[in-house]
Image (tube, rainbow, N blue to C red):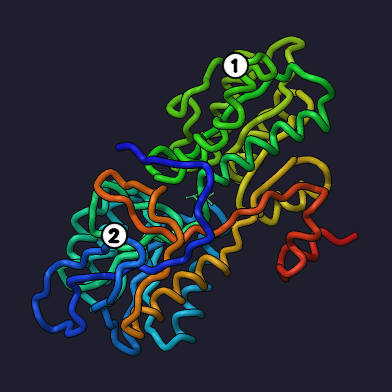
Amino acid sequence: MKISMRGAAAFAAVSAIALAGCSSDRGDDTEPTTSSTAGAAGSEVCIEEGAAIGVALPQKTSENWVLAEQLFNDGLTEAGFEPIVQFGNSGVTEQQNQISAMLEQDAQVIVVGAIDGSQLGSQLEAAHEAGAPVIAYDRLVLNTDAVDAYIAFDNFRVGELQGEALLQGLAERKGEGPYNIELIAGSSDDANSTPFFEGAMSILQPKIDDGTLTVVSGQTTFEQAATAGWQAQNAQSRMDTIMSGSYSGDTELHGILSPNDTLARAALTSVDQAGKDTPVITGQDSEVESVTSIVAGEQYSTIYKDTRQLVAQTIASIEELAACGEIPVNDTEQYDNGVKVVPAFLLDPQIVTQENAAEVYADDATLGPLTEG
Ligand code: BGC
């Protein structure tokens, strides 16, 4: 599987995808839904007023997923739909079964945040056979053409911002280089983890090559850096091994690339237990504990991906389908899922450090107050 990525997303041209071949009469046995390219004219999908909408979320591996559950329930209800929102807490099989059950309950759209992006092909094909469009939410689904749109924050850009923040933090807090760093990546079954890592490495690799940065453990590949299931204990135990193997004696660890806040806090615990100074560390998700830590000058950065915006964009797309319209997209190049380039609506992630936290979170009732006083 190869996901093709390019650095800059084309936010300028917002177009729409047509879901051709899908009849507005849901009773007949129509052709499977297929999406055509952005800007194509004429949608044939008209979901019914009050339709059931299936939202299959992964495990609660970060706060954004928990918030999404509530926002989907409230927002879909308010928009006049009947939400069926479920977490696949026990893994891939549970998520597969949940999607099948949603279709049995006549869900007319399937929104999916995949646990394993490559394991949902037959369930999503069944959705298309039933005439239900499929929207990949936050995480891409792979190796199937049974996906009509991808709605997410620009994952490659998230990684670039993390790489840039790490360099900036090192220069601010650790004096002149060269610097010793370590790399952490997300779970290899989540399609987001590769673009996060590749985006960051597009910034860091040149600095490794010119000797500014040294990965002391030598673990520089995605496979070596990956964290199974996005689980904090897996990142922590890998860091424990790295600390005892590569940072005994006086060797200092100046910085860590972490793909999200949960793993950043786990890595900081490991470094602290090894008796070393707090390294510059990146994150993502703007989790409450990490924002508090950033304000206190510990964790260096996080990323703000406003879940309210992502859910609102997804619900607006469903409302378009209910009006027999088309799902708006603004990128038709970046997200090749192995079978097709999935038309995407990409939102812009924001980097957050101690310096801009108050400004970025000003409109967020939960996070804004954490930056005061
Ligand atoms: C999301 C991240 C999150 C991670 C673990 C990813 O797919 O994009 O925001 O940190 O999953 O939950």
Query: What residue type is disc 2 on?
Result: Val
Q: Residues within 10 Å of mark 2 (few under 14, many from 20)?
A: many
Q: Nearer the viewer, mark 1 or mark 2?
A: 1
How many angstroms separate mark 1 from mark 2 (CA)? Answer: 39 Å
The image quadrant that residue 236 belongs to is: top right
Secondary element under disc 2, as helix, strand or loop, is loop
Q: Residues within 10 Å of mark 1 (few under 14, many from 20)?
A: few
Asked if residue 244 can be seen in this view, the reply is no
Q: Position of residue 3 (x, y in %)?
A: 37, 41
Query: What residue type is disc 1 on?
Result: Asp
Q: Residue at x 42, y 88 (%)?
A: 80
- Residue at label 2? 147
Q: Is residue 82 above or below residue 58?
A: below
Q: Residue at x 37, y 54 (%)?
A: 114
The answer to whether 337 appears left or right of 261 in the picture is left
Between residues 201 and 228, which one lies in front from this camera angle? 201
For the N terminus, the image quarter is top left
Q: Is residue 328 above or below residue 186?
A: below
- Residue at label 1? 209
